[in-house]
Image (cartoon, grey):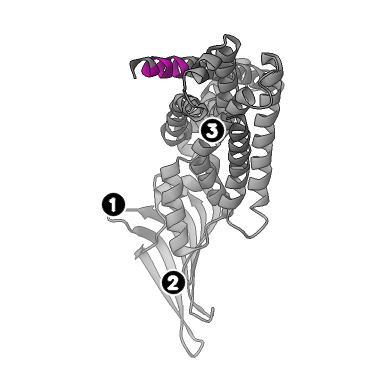
Amino acid sequence: MFARRLVAKHVTKTSTLAMLGATGVLTLLQFLFTYLAELSELKHGYTATQALAYVFWNTPNYLYEILPISALIGSVIGLGTLASNSELIVMRSVGISLWRIVGWVIRSAMLLVILSFALSQWIIPYTTEKADSIKKHQTVAALGEVKGYWTREGQRFIYVDYANSQGALRNIQVLDFDDNYRLKGVLNAEQGQYSSTGQWNLKQSQQMQIQANGDGHLTQSAQLPLSLALQPKYVHMVTIDPEDLAPSQLVSFMHYLSEYSQVPKTYQLAFWKKVGMPFSLIALVVIACSFIFGPLRQQSMGFRLVIALFVGLGFYYLQDFLGYASLVYSPSPAWFVFIPIVVIFVAGGYLLNRAK
């Protein structure tokens, strides 16, 4: 039992170091190539130093995207090293099952799973805004401004000419309809401010109420409270790419949208991609293990790495393509996100079962 724990620790340590090494190298290469690409966009007001800062703040995003491929390549390198030293043969000869070894490698990959969650939940939403502020020469607060925004809450349609994350509105128009979509009233206001009580206070408003007989009644108010579900934090989220939102932000925003209007598929796709990230990472680890124990066990390390890279890139592009295809077709984006993951799991499991 003690010997098996030592073997498990050895396999886990070797796989972890290989995955972390692959992650570090790929992140460094991504940083370098992205910076070289940014140098071609230099202009007045956007210097090489600013380009370096922009790439630096975007590095967590690059790291998050390459984690599945890092796990794939790291698994191939880690297990390949053990195989080259005949350690895997010794493990199998003393009765250690193939799936137990695979489980130890998956245990190593859990470190990358935790890292991916931490990046998406706490780090990327902050660093992406910092990067955008450098590229667009705006403060982070200015990035949260919305100009020309429509939203719907039941039978009420709201247009806001300007809004920001501090709770300020300008030039607001509210259209109220009955159940048959006949216009009941129109409200126009020059300014609005979100109060601590959870209500919007409109200033310099004009409200036209349409009577059943078609007559209109105009009311002018210096201040008018208006109950809207729209909150400053949701105004801020509208300005951010859905893929840059934290999972908790996506859940909150989609819950708000589902209550008052239809949830855009871009937010659903971003959410399911983040849910599927740990499964993608583990699926690629399984297929990597099948390269070592399966049909590629007699091949060189270089050949295995090339095949692993092709499989990883193919998986990434297939999932990306199917994800965006889900924006066109009616099924939920979850199906399109998880189909490539299931395919990789099934292929890896099949090859490993053949190697048993």
- Report, in whole angstroms, how far the alpha carbon at label 2 lies from the one at label 1: 24 Å
Label 3 sits on residue: 281
Q: Classify 10 Å Cα crowding around label 2: few (below 14), some (14-19), many (20 and above).
A: some
Q: Which residues are magenta?
A: 4-13
- Residue 7 colored in magenta in the image: yes
Residue 172 percent location from the top left of the image: 48, 60
Q: Earlier in the sequence, mark 2 or mark 3?
A: 2
Q: In terms of image quadrants, where is residue 55? A: top right
Answer with the quarter of the image where residue 56 lies.
top right
Nearer-N-terminus badge (2/1): 1
| Residue in the picture at 51% in, 27% down | 102
Residue visible at 43% across and 36% down in the picture:
121
Q: Is disc 2 in contact with disc 1, using a CB cutoff of under 8 Å?
A: no
Secondary structure of the residue carrying tag 1 is loop
Residue pointed to by mark 1: 196
- Could you tell me which secondary element the residue under label 3 belongs to? helix
Q: Between marks 1 and 3, how big is the CA–CA gap?
A: 43 Å
Amino acid type at circle 1 is Ser
Residue 22 drawn at (x, y percent): 57, 18
Sequence-earlier tag: 1 or 3: 1
The kind of residue on which mark 3 rests is: Leu
Question: Comparing marks 1 and 3, which lies closer to the viewer?
Answer: 3
Disc 2 and disc 3 in contact, CB within 8 angstroms: no
Image point 64% across, 27% down: which residue? Answer: 294
**Amino acid of disc 2:** Gln
Q: Which residue carries the number 2 mark?
A: 207
Inspect the magenta stretch and tell me whether residue 28 lies in it.
no
